[in-house]
């Protein structure tokens, strides 16, 4: 009987060891991801600094908290989106000319889809926000309808070309405007996937089930021998 049990025991222990190692790997990834999210949160909420000169795709300035004084020019593009609270909305990506003579993009936030064509005149403002280059464009993203000014993703380089600005996007957090016509939608870490805990639990449950099946197999062998 013992000889017949050798293969099931080895099969069970090796399989469980592999599954447990995968669970441990995901647990390590969880610690790694949490550390990254903590650093990002600290950077988002740090004291704002002056607008840097680096390009928008420079990883060193992602999520950087910045403050700038200048003027919304009235030039903007509209990105079709949806939120849980409001349903269909448009993100308003506006051109902003700083007092130092630079022209950048500002994600002012969202408006209801019925207010897409509302007048948002040029105005002076002091803004605080975070630099972000969202990775929203893939092979399935439709091309923007430039005639109707409808975009389907925040394509920073292309938007910068259309609005004749630097390829830097500031996601607005605070503004000196009185009664802003656009509701800010500040950047945070909620959209960054962190499923490693679920993955770890899944692998550990697989390991437990594997050991359970191995135990059942051994029980069947012993019962058959009896």
Image (cartoon, rainbow, N blue to C red):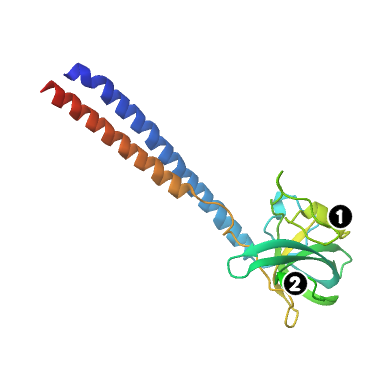
Does residue 156 lie above or below 6 as drawn? Answer: below
Considering the numbered disc 1 on the image, is that residue within a helix, a strand or a loop?
A: helix
Q: Would residue 4 appear left or right of 52 to someone viewing this image?
A: left
Q: Residue 87 in the image: x percent, y percent? A: 62, 67
Nearest the eye: 13 or 158? 158
Q: Position of residue 102 (x, y in %)?
A: 87, 63
Residue at 49%, 49% (x, y): give it. 195
* Front-lying residue, 203 or 32: 203
Query: Residue 91: which numbered mark, if any?
Result: none
Q: Is residue 216 above or below residue 39?
A: above
In the image, residue 111 above or below residue 178:
above
List the residue tagged with mark 1: 161
Q: Kindly tell me whether residue 65 is visible in this rendering.
A: no
Residue 99: give x, y in percent of width and height. Answer: 86, 70
Assess disc 1: are there few (<14), some (14-19) or many (≥20) residues with their C-alpha within 10 Å of its C-alpha: few
The C terminus appears in which quarter of the rendering?
top left
- At a point 78% along the width and 60% down the height, the residue shown is 150
Question: Is 221 on the left or on the right of 110, as rendered?
Answer: left
* Residue 116 visible somewhere in the drawing: yes
Q: CA distance from mark 1 to mark 2?
A: 22 Å
Of the numbered discs 1 and 2, the one sitting upstream in the chain is 2
Pointer 1 with pointer 2, Cβ within 8 A: no
Query: Residue 47 is drawn in which quadrant?
Result: bottom right
Residue ID for mark 2: 127
Query: Observer-nearest residue: 225 or 97?
Result: 225
> Quadrant of the image for the N terminus?
top left
Looking at the image, which residue sits at the far bottom? 178
Counting from the top left corner in percent of width and height, residue 20 is at 37, 37
SS category of the residue bearing label 2:
strand
């Amino acid at each position: 009987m013992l000889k017949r049990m050798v293969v099931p025991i080895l099969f069970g222990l090796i399989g469980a060891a592999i599954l447990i190692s995968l669970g441990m790997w995901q647990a390590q990834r969880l610690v790694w991801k949490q550390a990254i999210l903590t650093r990002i949160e600290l950077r988002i909420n740090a004291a704002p600094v002056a607008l840097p000169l680096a390009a928008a795709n420079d990883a060193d300035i992602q999520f950087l908290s910045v403050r700038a004084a200048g003027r919304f020019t009235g030039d903007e593009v509209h990105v079709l989106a949806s939120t849980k609270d409001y349903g269909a909305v448009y993100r308003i990506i506006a051109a902003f000319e700083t007092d130092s003579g630079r022209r950048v993009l500002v994600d002012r936030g969202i408006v209801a889809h019925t207010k897409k064509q509302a007048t948002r005149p040029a105005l002076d403002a002091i803004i605080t926000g975070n630099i972000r280059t969202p990775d929203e464009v893939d092979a399935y993203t439709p091309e923007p309808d430039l005639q109707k000014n409808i975009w389907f993703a925040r394509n920073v380089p292309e938007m910068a070309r259309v609005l004749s600005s630097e390829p830097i996007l500031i996601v607005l957090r605070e503004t000196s405007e009185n009664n802003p016509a656009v509701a800010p939608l500040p950047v945070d870490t909620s959209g960054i996937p962190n499923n490693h805990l679920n993955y770890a639990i899944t692998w550990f449950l697989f390991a437990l089930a594997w050991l359970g099946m191995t135990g059942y197999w051994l029980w069947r062998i012993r019962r058959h021998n009896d």
